[in-house]
Each structure stands twice: as C-alpha cells, then as structure tokens.
Amino acid sequence: MAVEETIRLCMEQNVLAEFLKGRKKEVMDAMNILYDQDYIWNAALKESRDEGLERGRLEGEAINSQKTAVRMAGMGFSVEEIANVLDEEVKTVQTWLNK
C-alpha cells in the first residue's frame, strides 16, 4: 500500500521518525482518509467533466441540426422532409424554422 510505503520511507530517511514511531496507525488512518477523499473528489470531477463534454456535444449537434433545417427550408424542402432527414420530430423542426 502506498501509505505504508510512504511512512516506511519517511522513517528510513529519519523524516519525522520519532513522531511516526508513536503514531504510525494514527498517521496511516489520516493518510488513508485523505487518499479516499482525493479519490472521491477526482472521480466526481471526472464524472462532472464527462457530463459537461457530453452536454456540449449534444448542444452542438442540436445547433447544427437547426442550421441544417434552416438551410434545407431555404432550398425548398418541406418540414416533413427536413424532420425525416434530420431524424427529428416535425414539431421540433417547425419550432426551429419559426425562430
């Protein structure tokens, strides 16, 4: 375990050796808690980042579909044809074109 190895190295190199001799378990418990908190924090951060990237990707796709719908309407495609090509609901395409 990394915590035990860190404590061993500190004691070996006489870094806080006296303190660690008497409080090794206490220090290990505290370091494990900090490690767990850091792990949880990083996992939550990654999850948030991934969700944000996915949301941005979906919003980008929606914007692109809206622009494509407007171009297609300008080319004479019907709302139904646009909805079919973009795999969207007719109501959604109508909303985009009425903006």
Image (tube, rainbow, N blue to C red):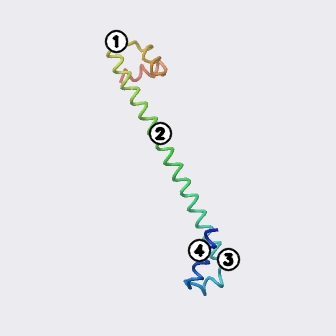
Q: Give the side of residue 28 with respect to residue 93, left or right.
A: right
Decide which of 98, 31 is in the foreground and name it: 31
Dot 1: what SS?
Answer: loop
Q: Which residue is mark 3?
A: 25
* Mark nearer the N terminus (4 vs 2): 4
Image coords of residue 47 (percent x, y)? 54, 49
Residue matched to label 1: 76
**Mark 3 → mark 1, Cα distance in angstroms:** 76 Å
Numbered label attached to residue 56? none
**Residue at 42 percent of width and 19 percent of height:** 94
Q: Quadrant of residue 86?
A: top left
Residue found farthest to the right: 25
- Disc number lying in front (4 or 2): 4
Residues under labels 2 and 3: Cα distance? Answer: 44 Å
In the picture, measured across the screen, residue 4 lies left or right of residue 84, that is right
Q: Which residue is mark 2?
A: 55
Q: Which residue is mark 4?
A: 6
Give the percent coordinates (x, y) of residue 99: 35, 24
Q: Residue at x 56, y 54 (%)?
A: 43
Expressed as whole percent of the image width and height from the top left, the position of residue 82 reads 42, 17
Q: Are marks 3 and 1 in contact (CB under 8 Å)?
A: no
Location of residue 59 with respect to 19 vertically, above or below: above
Q: Residue furthest bottom?
A: 18
Residue type marked 3:
Lys
Q: Which quadrant: the N terminus?
A: bottom right
